Amino acid sequence: MKSPLELDEEEVQILQDFERGEFTSITHFKEAKRKLEEAAAEFLQKDKRINIRISSRDLEALKKRANREGMPYQTLISSTLHKFVTGKLRSME
């Protein structure tokens, strides 16, 4: 017997909305997709470089945390800063 699909709360809501027919097809899909891809690329573009001085202890801790998360430490720092400035920073503990 097949086990039921386990969905999180957001996925359940999406499935319910789909089953109620609340999704509609996008007219001119290719054009809409192109515009969204361009907006995403522009938003994600990293066009500025900074230099900061931090303690070697903090840098080592950042590198260890990034390794556990499976990403380069610069990406972790950038992501954390982005979350901070957008008000989305949550404790990682």
Image (tube, rainbow, N blue to C red):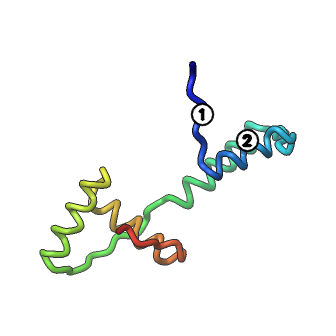
Residue 81: image quadrant is: bottom left
Q: Are marks 2 and 1 in contact (CB under 8 Å)?
A: no
Mark 2 belongs to which amino acid?
Answer: Leu
Q: Nearer the viewer, residue 21 or 39?
A: 21
Q: Which residue is painted at 55% across and 53% down in the image? A: 41
Q: Nearer the viewer, residue 62 or 74?
A: 62
Q: Is residue 62 left or right of residue 56?
A: right
Q: Is residue 50 left or right of residue 12?
A: left
Task: Tell me the crowding category of disc 1: few under 14, some 14 to 19, or many 20 or more residues within 10 angstroms, Cα based.
Answer: few
Image coordinates for residue 11, horizontal then vertical, percent = 65, 46
Count of residue discs: 2
Name of the residue lying farthest toward the top: 1
Q: Which residue is mark 1?
A: 5
Q: Is residue 77 left or right of residue 27?
A: left
Spatial CA distance of label 2 from label 1 is: 12 Å
Q: Which residue is painted at 32% across and 54% down in the image? A: 69
Q: Nearer the viewer, residue 7 or 46?
A: 7
Image coordinates for residue 33, horizontal then vertical, percent = 69, 42
Q: Which residue is painted at 77% across and 38% down in the image? A: 29
Q: Tell me if residue 76 comes above or below residue 6 in the rendering.
A: below
Residue 43: image quadrant is: bottom right
Q: Which residue is mark 2?
A: 15
Q: Is residue 83 left or right of residue 76?
A: right
Name of the residue lying farthest toward the front: 1
Image coordinates for residue 34, horizontal then vertical, percent = 67, 43
The quadrant of the image that shows the N terminus is top right
Mark 1 belongs to which amino acid?
Answer: Leu
Name of the residue lying farthest toward the left: 56
